[in-house]
Image (cartoon, grey):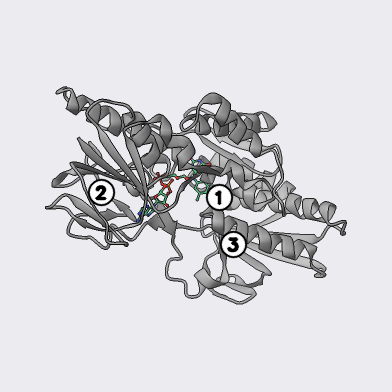
């Protein structure tokens, strides 16, 4: 069975590895980048840690799976009746089964100039650009620095919690006085981490305030100008604006409305993660409209589910229905502190942070043998060359 997987992220790579070395499968994994990126560690790279804990070359992950061929290419088109996808370089990839897991892009909700005037934390390239800008500011002659972080979901909260600490690291390295940094975290919702339980939001808010972060809730951002964000509660000056307030599926799907139906920025899938009327096309991870989409854990469990079903199908066994797995939320806020929410409880503090760090290691174990995963994990203990 010829399987073409598009997207070298959590769902795409995990599917390839789960089908790796399984007889009867010939897999082509196509991705625009040659590396896997662990987004959960991006806030650390943005605030001084080594980017090597975010980036793992696919050539280090895939050789274990002998039936997987990696191609670096960008898919832009699909010919579903002829069962093939087409890349921007004109390459054509025929498939028996197509697995799409292309992840999300930043959503600015049509706010004009926001993409040009703000920085983002969505890829390692953008995160390193953000870190350079922060370093410049913390080294500069400016007496007071104002940073506005828009979006109080996990990414915004994680970043906001680390900024003061990074200012201290920069001051220490360049033998400067520690800057007075005002971090303002803005969100239209009534609480920080609005998708978590109210108890978790309450603890997170108290922690952010202890770290000196000014939190502005129930506040909409209407527009943005150089050095300023315009909020419905008044204008806010900012030396740096970071946008973490939204994302949606890559435009590939909305460019093909004859095949894909979108709901809440994601692709509608059935109980097998297939696209309606196209049982040979599967959509996984952030792109699929499933209950816990938007989490790495969901992308990984989607991949395991699909691979198991394809193996069953090949063996002539009945396939199973998709069952969404409730994820565990783990949000670090400032050095050595995190909040964890499981199905039954919320915990916080240094122990929760240690649990989160163990979860980081567990993520690498999905892609690398134990010793290699441990090496990747330990790279995060090093500082970057900022
Ligand atoms: C800042 C941040 C922090 C996060 N923290 C956490 C966390 O702590 N815990 C958690 O569970 N989740 C977290 N997430 C969410 C998590 O990263 C995603 O849920 C996960 O990456 C989704 O996996 P995926 O395989 O669907 O997509 P991705 O991992 O994004 O992979 C998509 C891949 O497809 C490639 N691609 C895109 N378009 C094309 C194309 N046209 N052709 C070829 N290749 C293409 C991309 O380059 C990428 O390699 C975080 C996300 C962000 C942005």
Which quadrant of the view contains residue 264? bottom left
From the viewer's perspective, is 35 left or right of 70?
A: right
Quarter of the image containing the N terminus? top left
In the rendering, at what x and y percent does residue 112 appear?
Answer: 47, 75
- Tag 3, which secondary structure? strand
Residue, x 72% and y 55% (percent of image)? 386
The verdict on label 1 being within 8 Å of ligand 1 is yes
Please name whichever residue, 58 or 309, is drawn nearer the observer in this view of the structure. 58
Check residue 155 in the rendering and tell me which mark sits there, or answer none. 1
Which residue occupies the foreground of this view, 306 or 261? 306
Tell me the crowding category of disc 1: few under 14, some 14 to 19, or many 20 or more residues within 10 angstroms, Cα based: many
Q: Mark 3 points at which residue?
A: 242
Counting residues from the N terminus, which is met first, the one under dot 3 or under dot 1? 1
Q: Can residue 370 be seen in this view?
A: yes
Q: How far apart are marks 2 and 1 (CA)?
A: 25 Å
Q: Position of residue 274 (x, y in %)?
A: 22, 42
């Amino acid at each position: 069975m010829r399987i073409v997987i598009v997207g070298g992220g959590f769902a795409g790579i995990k599917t390839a590895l789960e089908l790796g070395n399984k007889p009867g499968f010939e897999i082509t994994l196509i991705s625009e980048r040659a590396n896997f990126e662990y987004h959960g560690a991006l806030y650390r790279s943005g605030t001084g840690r080594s980017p090597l804990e975010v980036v793992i070359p696919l050539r280090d992950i895939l050789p274990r799976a002998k039936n997987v061929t990696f191609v670096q290419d960008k898919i832009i088109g699909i010919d579903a009746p002829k069962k093939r996808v087409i890349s921007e370089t004109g390459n054509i990839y025929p498939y028996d089964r197509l697995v799409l897991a292309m992840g999300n892009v930043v959503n600015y909700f049509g706010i004009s100039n926001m993409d040009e005037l703000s920085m983002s934390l969505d890829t390692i390239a953008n995160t390193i650009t953000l870190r350079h800008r922060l370093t410049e500011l913390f080294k500069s002659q400016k007496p007071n620095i104002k940073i506005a972080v828009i979006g109080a979901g996990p990414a915004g909260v994680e970043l906001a919690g680390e900024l003061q600490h990074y200012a201290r690291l920069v001051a220490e390295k360049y033998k400067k006085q520690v800057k007075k940094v005002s971090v303002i975290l803005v969100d239209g919702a009534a609480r920080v981490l609005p998708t978590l339980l109210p108890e978790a939001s309450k603890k997170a808010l108290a922690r952010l305030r202890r770290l000196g972060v000014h939190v502005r809730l129930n506040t909409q951002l209407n527009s943005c100008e150089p050095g300023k964000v315009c909020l419905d509660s008044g204008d806010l000056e900012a030396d740096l604006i970071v946008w973490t307030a939204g994302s949606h599926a890559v435009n590939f799907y909305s460019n093909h409305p004859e095949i894909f139906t979108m709901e809440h920025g994601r692709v509608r899938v059935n109980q097998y993660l297939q696209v309606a009327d196209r049982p040979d096309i599967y959509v996984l991870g952030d792109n699929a409209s499933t209950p816990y989409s938007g989490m790495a854990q969901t992308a990984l469990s989607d991949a395991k589910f699909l691979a198991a079903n394809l193996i069953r199908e090949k063996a002539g066994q009945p396939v199973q229905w998709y069952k969404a797995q409730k994820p565990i939320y783990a949000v670090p806020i400032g050095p050595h502190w995190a909040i964890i929410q499981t199905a039954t409880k919320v915990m916080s503090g240094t122990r929760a942070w240690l649990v989160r760090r163990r979860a980081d290691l567990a993520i690498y174990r999905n892609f690398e043998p134990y010793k290699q995963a441990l090496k990747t994990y330990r790279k995060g203990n090093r500082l970057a060359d900022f």
